[in-house]
Amino acid sequence: MPADPAERRAVLTSDTTAAIERVQVDRWRAMSSVEKARLVSDSTRATLALAAAGIRQRYPGASERECFLRLVARTLGPDLARRVYPEAERLADLR
């Protein structure tokens, strides 16, 4: 470990070199607030799309509404999902 605290760094990923991580962090620092918000929003949207695709794959016969309720349960947790969407109670595996 480097003696100088300025040379220490948190490792963001185990498969990326320190030099590349520095480039990435410098790019994040150079981004405007709008660019950062867009990056977070796009990442969130992609994550939700992947989660929804996984639900459709696990429950191929489910309606769009059931898939939505399952996504809500994954996002909010089953208890809050049932309080916000009482119809989620009918999904036996969410009880």
Image: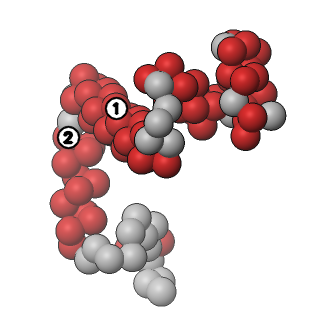
- Residue 40 is at least partly visible in this image: no
In this rendering, the label closer to the viewer, 2 or 1:
1
Q: Amino acid at mark 1?
A: Arg
Lateral position of residue 50 relative to residue 71, left or right: left
Percent of width and height locating residue 11: 42, 70
The reply, left or right, for residue 2 in relation to residue 86 is left
- Whole-angstrom CA distance, mark 2 to mark 1, is 23 Å
Q: Position of residue 24 (x, y in %)?
A: 23, 56
Which residue is drawn at the image coordinates 60% and 37% (left, top)? 74
Picture quadrant of residue 76: top right
| Kind of residue indicated by mark 2 | Ala
Residue 45 in percent (x, y) is at 34, 32
Numbered circle sitting on residue 30:
2
User: Of helix, strand and loop, which one carries label 2?
Assistant: helix
Quadrant of the drawing holding the C terminus: top right
- Which residue carries the number 1 mark? 45
> For the point 32% across and 77% down, which residue is it?
15
Residue at the spot 78% in from the left edge and 27% down from the top edge: 79
Q: How many numbered markers are drawn?
A: 2
